[in-house]
Amino acid sequence: MTKMPFRFALLMGAALLLSMPCPVRAAEAQSGAVRDLALSGGGTQRVLYARPAAPRGTIVMLPGGAGDLGIEDDGDLAHGKNFVVRTREMWLAHGYAVVIPDALDGENMRGERSSPDYARVIEDLVRFAHKEAPGPVFLLGTSQGSIAAMNGAAHLPKGQIAGVVLTESVTRESKSGETVFDASPGRVTVPALIVANRDSRCRVALAEDAPRIAAALSHAPEAKLLYVEGGEKRSGNCGSQSPHGYFGIESTVVGQIAAWLDAHR
């Protein structure tokens, strides 16, 4: 598979690396950075990190699928088609720094995202985001990654995140054996945005299930539904290059989500 280079137009580059905390190793990737974060539970977590000059906040972006991006030392990606990965420059243009984690140890993350152990990993990612840039931190997950976002929002200490965005959330039985409903939605106490594409044909992440997610967020101060439409299909129904992955409508979807983030900063 052809690798996608890690290029950001609006990043800090060398200045960002100078502010790197001690337990983190970094490799400069043109105008972005690859970080290996020391995890509180042991081991490391590799991430892509990028920020505009004056960030409005930070988004911890949780990819779907197996979660394996294959981030190399130079910032190249073995798998870079996921929605939250290929739109990273758009988020920067809207003023948000991004933290995008790879799979732990390069392993398949299916079935692991609703676990207490992974909630602690997300807490480490959020802690890193707060250290690197001022402003609020949000979680954003897509497809299988929405399970991770829900899990993090349910277990993070109060005040650590300003909100959670769940896009194309897995709500039906799938190969992972877990859904967003296994990630303690009733414990979420921050505003939530639920994004669903009416034109998606992914059988495990149906737009008609969005109200069920909102109902499960029984203690969230807000559980807003955002329906979108459209998208091209160049992969399977649950693939990244389909309406499920907002392929071809990325700018519209990112703009609508960014407007919600701005309102909750």
Image (cartoon, rainbow, N blue to C red):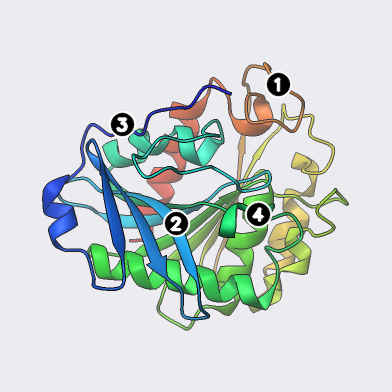
- Front residue of 58/206: it is 58
Marks 1 and 4, the one that precedes in the sequence: 4
Determine if residue 173 is in view.
yes
Q: Amino acid at mark 1?
A: Ser
Location of mark 2 (residue): 46
Of mark 1 and mark 3, the one earlier in the sequence is: 3
Name the residue rendered at 59%, 52% in the picture: 106
Q: Which residue is mark 3?
A: 7
In the rendered image, the quadrant that contains the C terminus is bottom left
Mark 4: amino acid: Glu
Q: Amino acid at mark 2?
A: Arg
Quadrant of image for the N terminus: top right
Task: Residue 18 in the image: state x and y as whole percent.
Answer: 13, 59
Check whether the beta carbons of the residues at disc 4 and disc 3 lie within 8 A of each other.
no
- Up-down relation of residue 180 to residue 197 (above or below): below
Labels 1 and 3 touching (C-beta < 8 A):
no
In 3D space, how far apart are the residues under numbered discs 2 and 4 (Cα atoms)?
A: 12 Å
2 or 1: mark nearer the eye: 2
Nearer the camera: disc 1 or disc 4: 4
CA gap, disc 1 to disc 4?
23 Å
Distance CA(mark 2)–CA(mark 1): 27 Å
